Structures are given as structure tokens and as C-alpha cells.
Image (tube, rainbow, N blue to C red):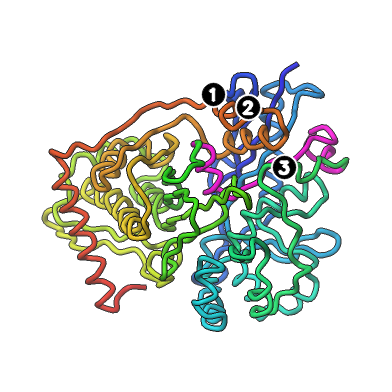
């Protein structure tokens, strides 16, 4: 009988499922729903919300598709892993009913609340204990609900992250993870537990916070109701859970100090692992508990996140022809412009406030446009160079923290499908880039195998991981890319000084 593992990846654009055959370490079925991107509602400028029940609907559709395609039989499914969009807030009542739409990761309404908490707690507590400012993370979003929607707050039984909600729908149990508490800025790294001081400062009832389980552990089992809605057998364990960025790093076997992972989907990220609780004094990059953290063997993930990356590329596609132009055609088009786009600069920060900009609403800007010189190819190249430059800006912050940035791993997906993007990334940052055939759903499935004891070790879990390509920087061609970055940073600084940002 086969031993199968189900991985779920709950994004803000789509929900993906992957079935992994534990004996080969290979995906035998995968599917993402919906075909078009899920809607993000913005009732006011800077807000971003989604209905958690919408995620659940697509989870059920993806599960049905992959189980049907793989012809899953009773007894074959051994574990379920869940990855999810980080920092979202889900509130439920005693009957586990959703009280309001989820305030998701790119929502920026709680910036001022986070800053107020930072001032109240003091940097001498926040930085050593939380490794972050409370910022615009889940705790601040919850405080916003308490202050602005007291009638909803009065009904709250538990608060959750998006992955916790999906696990609840499958199992009927409300549990979170240690990584999840840290990403919500509820975690005290010195005490290795829930931050009582933060809860007191923000007046958040402690009993709203679910109990926490390790990322690799049996966190619940599929209930009779979960089985009825999904077709999965009763009793299948939920044995892994992590936010999308820790999980993406895990899916690339980034588990040891000095290893780094990157993504370039709707947002762009670099996630590096360290064994010391490093922090940026300005909280421009953020430190969380990594999936393999324990008291005996601490493991931390430092996350650089730029909200306005792949979303800029998808926006360009829409205005350049939508379904009449492919990303591949855009990549070819951009490759026809010279490095530096002949002075055209794209600042990509148009998807909410940016942490690396200290939560300032910088916005997206196309600068230096010459109507007699620039055309579509320059715009496409400037956009991709601007996205890489924004990641480079964050790379330099991470280097200043003492992190080693030599080799970066990524799945060959999203913007890393673009040869132009890949080459710019490698040359501008002077790093080796390893591209793998994997994704977040596969990573979650591997995690489920470890948590359920299907795999005897981490190394066994990754035996089926395929390295597709390695790219190395060419020092003979570095200078034009460094010049392009210098041009980008100069334009960014001029924009910030001008007061026109935001």
C-alpha cells in the first residue's frame, strides 16, 4: 500500500494541494484553485481582507481534485501539512464561526497601533525579547479590531492565523504553532513562550490565544465533519504547520545557519536561517521562530519581505494586454532593453506599506520616463530590475546584521521563470542561485511526513528534491548591474527626500 502525504498551501492568490508519494519523494498530483487569482477586498485605502470560508472552499476543491487524480484509497493518506499566508488574523466565536473577514498580510491599517505599542513597551524590551517592533503584524491587527469593532471583539473566542483556521475546519480543534505565535509578534524569545507583557500592553485576553504545538507534531486529526466535507478519512493526522516563508525555506531544505531561500510571487522574500536571535534595530527585516526550532537547538528565520514585487509584474501584464500577452513574451520583451533601462527606474512599493521602508507608504513610481526614448521593453525591464533592486536593498540590511549571503535557493516558479529576472538577481546581489523543482505545497507534504513519523529523518524527507539549475555571477559583467542598482537607490532616496512618496 502506498504511503501518501497531502500538502496544502493557503496563499492570498490561490490555494494549492500536492500529494507526495513518500517512497519516491515525488509529487504524484497537484492542483491550484481558482484558475484566476482570489479576490482581495479593500474597503478602504491600505486595507486588505479575504473571507476565510473562501479559502476553505478552494481547499476542498483542491483536495477533491488531487485525491481523484491519484485515486487515493482508504489507509493510504498518512499525514496532512499546512502552509499559509503569514500574519493574517482570523477571529471565531465559541461555535467556530468566523466573526469578520480576515485582515491579511498586506493590510496596513494597524501601523500606528504597532508603533504605539513599540513606544509603550520600549525598544529595550521589544528588540531583545520580540526581535521586532510589533509593527503591522497580527497582534496589532487584533488590537485594531478591539479598538474599532468592539461588538465583534466581544464575541471572540479564539484568534487564529490562516493555517490554523484550515486546520480547525479539518479537525474541529483550535491549535496554533510556535512559529505562528512568533510571526504574530506574540512570542517572547528570551522566555521562549507567549509574551505576557505584549498582551498586557495591547489589552489582549490571554485565553484568546490558542495553545501552541511544534511545527512537526500531531496537531489534530481529521474529524467526522472534516471527513464529510473533504472526503478524507477520519483520523488522518495534521502533522505539520508553518507560515509560507518558513515553509518555503523548509521546502528547499533550508534548515541550517547560513542557508537562505527566496521567493518572487505576489510578494518577494529572502529568508535566512541563523542560530542566534539576530534583529535589525529598525525592524526593516524580521526574525521569527524557524520550523525546526527547539529549546536545545534554537533556530531562527530572518525574513526580508517586499510586498510590491510579483504584483507589479502581474499589473503590467494586465495593462499591456492581459490574456493577449504571456509572461514569457513580456520577459523576452524586457530582455530587448539594455541593463539599466536607459535611465528608466521603477520603484515597486505599491502593495501596502513596506517593512524595509520602516512602514512608510512609499507607493509605486515610474521615474525618468522619456517619451522619445522609452517604450514597453524599457518599462518591463525597469520593473524587473526594480523588483530585484528592492530585494538587494533588503539584502544589504541582512548583511549588516551579520548574515552570510552567498548561496540562495528558490523554486523555479513565478518570477524566477524569467531569465532576465534570474540573471539580474544573481549579478546584482553577487550570489549563487540554486533552482529546485518544488513549491510550498510539496514542502508542506514533506513536513507532514516528518511530523507523522513517515520519514525517519529530515534527509530522508528530501531524497526526492530535484536541483534543476545553478546560476553563478559573472564578475566580468557585474558593473552594469551594480550601476543599475546605484541608479535605483539614488532615485529612491530622492523620492523619499522629496516628500512625494506615498
Residue 332, given in percent of the width and then of the height, sits at 26, 36
State the residue position of label 2: 20
Task: Report if residue 230 lies within the magenta region.
Answer: yes
Task: Tell me the residue at 57%/45% (across/down).
Answer: 14
Residue 207 is tagged as: none
Residue 245, given in percent of the width and then of the height, sits at 52, 49
State how far apart marks 1 and 3 are (Cα): 22 Å
State the residue position of label 3: 217
Q: Are marks 1 and 2 in contact (CB under 8 Å)?
A: yes
Neighbour class for label 2 at 10 Å: few (<14), some, many (≥20)?
A: many
User: Residue 158 is drawn in which quadrant?
Assistant: bottom right
Task: Tell me the residue at 50%/59% (across/down).
Answer: 277
Looking at the rendering, the stretch of residues picked out in magenta corresponds to 225-252
Q: Residue furthest right?
A: 224
Q: Is residue 414 above or below residue 179?
A: above
State the residue position of label 1: 464
Q: Say which label, 1 or 3, has the lower sequence index.
A: 3
Report the quarter where the C terminus lies. bottom left
Q: Say which label, 3 or 2, has the lower sequence index.
A: 2
Left or right of 270: which side holds 135? right
Task: Tell me the residue at 23%/62% (across/down).
Answer: 489
Neighbour class for label 3 at 10 Å: few (<14), some, many (≥20)?
A: many
Q: Are marks 3 and 2 in contact (CB under 8 Å)?
A: no
Left or right of 391: which side holds 182? right
Task: Report if residue 477 lies within the magenta region.
Answer: no
Residue 210, given in percent of the width and then of the height, sits at 75, 60
Amino acid at each position: 500500500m502506498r504511503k501518501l502525504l497531502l500538502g496544502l498551501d493557503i496563499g492570498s492568490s490561490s490555494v494549492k494541494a500536492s500529494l507526495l508519494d513518500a517512497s519516491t519523494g515525488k509529487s504524484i498530483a497537484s492542483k491550484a484553485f481558482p484558475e484566476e487569482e482570489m479576490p482581495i477586498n479593500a474597503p478602504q485605502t491600505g486595507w486588505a481582507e479575504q473571507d476565510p470560508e473562501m479559502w476553505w472552499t478552494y481547499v476542498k476543491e483542491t483536495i477533491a481534485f488531487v485525491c481523484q487524480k491519484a485515486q487515493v484509497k482508504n489507509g493510504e493518506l498518512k499525514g496532512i501539512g499546512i502552509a499559509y499566508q503569514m500574519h493574517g488574523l482570523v477571529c471565531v466565536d465559541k461555535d467556530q464561526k468566523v466573526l469578520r473577514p480576515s485582515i491579511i498580510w498586506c493590510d496596513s491599517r494597524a501601523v500606528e497601533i504597532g508603533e504605539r505599542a513599540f513606544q509603550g513597551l520600549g525598544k529595550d524590551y521589544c528588540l531583545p525579547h520580540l526581535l521586532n517592533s510589533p509593527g503591522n503584524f497580527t497582534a496589532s491587527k487584533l488590537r485594531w479590531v478591539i479598538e474599532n469593532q468592539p461588538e465583534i471583539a466581544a464575541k471572540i473566542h479564539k484568534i487564529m492565523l490562516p493555517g490554523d483556521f484550515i486546520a480547525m475546519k479539518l479537525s474541529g480543534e483550535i491549535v496554533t504553532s510556535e512559529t505562528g505565535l512568533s510571526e504574530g509578534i506574540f512570542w517572547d524569545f528570551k522566555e521562549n513562550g507567549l509574551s505576557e507583557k505584549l498582551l498586557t500592553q495591547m489589552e489582549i485576553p490571554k485565553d484568546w490565544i490558542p495553545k501552541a504545538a511544534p511545527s512537526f507534531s500531531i496537531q489534530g486529526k481529521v474529524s467526522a465533519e472534516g471527513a464529510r466535507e473533504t472526503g478524507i478519512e477520519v483520523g488522518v493526522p495534521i502533522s505539520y504547520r508553518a507560515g509560507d516563508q518558513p515553509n518555503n525555506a523548509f521546502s528547499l531544505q533550508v534548515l541550517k545557519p547560513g542557508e537562505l531561500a527566496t521567493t518572487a510571487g505576489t510578494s518577494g522574500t529572502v529568508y535566512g536561517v541563523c542560530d542566534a536571535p539576530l534583529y535589525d534595530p529598525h525592524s526593516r527585516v524580521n526574525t521569527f521562530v524557524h520550523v525546526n526550532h527547539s529549546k536545545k537547538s534554537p533556530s531562527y528565520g530572518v525574513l526580508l519581505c517586499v510586498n510590491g514585487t510579483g504584483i507589479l509584474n502581474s499589473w503590467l501584464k494586465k495593462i499591456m494586454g492581459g490574456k493577449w500577452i504571456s509572461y514569457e513574451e513580456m520577459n523576452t520583451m524586457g530582455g530587448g532593453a539594455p541593463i539599466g533601462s536607459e535611465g528608466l527606474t521603477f520603484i515597486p512599493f505599491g502593495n501596502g506599506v513596506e517593512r524595509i521602508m520602516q512602514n512608510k507608504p512609499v507607493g509605486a513610481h515610474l521615474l525618468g520616463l522619456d517619451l522619445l526614448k522609452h517604450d514597453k521593453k524599457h518599462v518591463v525591464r525597469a520593473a524587473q530590475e526594480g523588483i530585484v533592486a528592492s530585494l538587494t536593498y533588503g539584502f544589504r540590511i541582512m548583511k549588516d546584521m551579520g548574515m552570510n549571503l552567498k548561496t540562495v535557493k528558490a523554486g523555479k516558479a513565478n518570477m524566477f521563470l524569467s531569465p532576465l529576472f534570474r540573471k539580474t538577481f544573481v549579478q546584482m546581489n553577487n550570489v549563487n542561485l540554486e533552482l529546485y523543482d518544488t513549491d510550498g505545497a510539496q514542502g508542506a507534504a514533506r513536513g507532514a511526513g516528518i511530523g507523522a513519523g513517515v520519514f525517519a529523518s529530515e534527509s530522508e524527507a528530501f531524497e526526492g528534491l530535484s536541483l534543476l539549475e545553478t546560476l553563478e555571477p559573472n564578475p566580468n559583467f557585474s558593473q552594469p548591474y551594480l550601476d543599475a542598482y546605484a541608479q535605483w537607490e539614488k532615485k529612491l532616496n530622492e523620492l523619499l527626500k522629496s516628500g512625494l512618496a506615498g
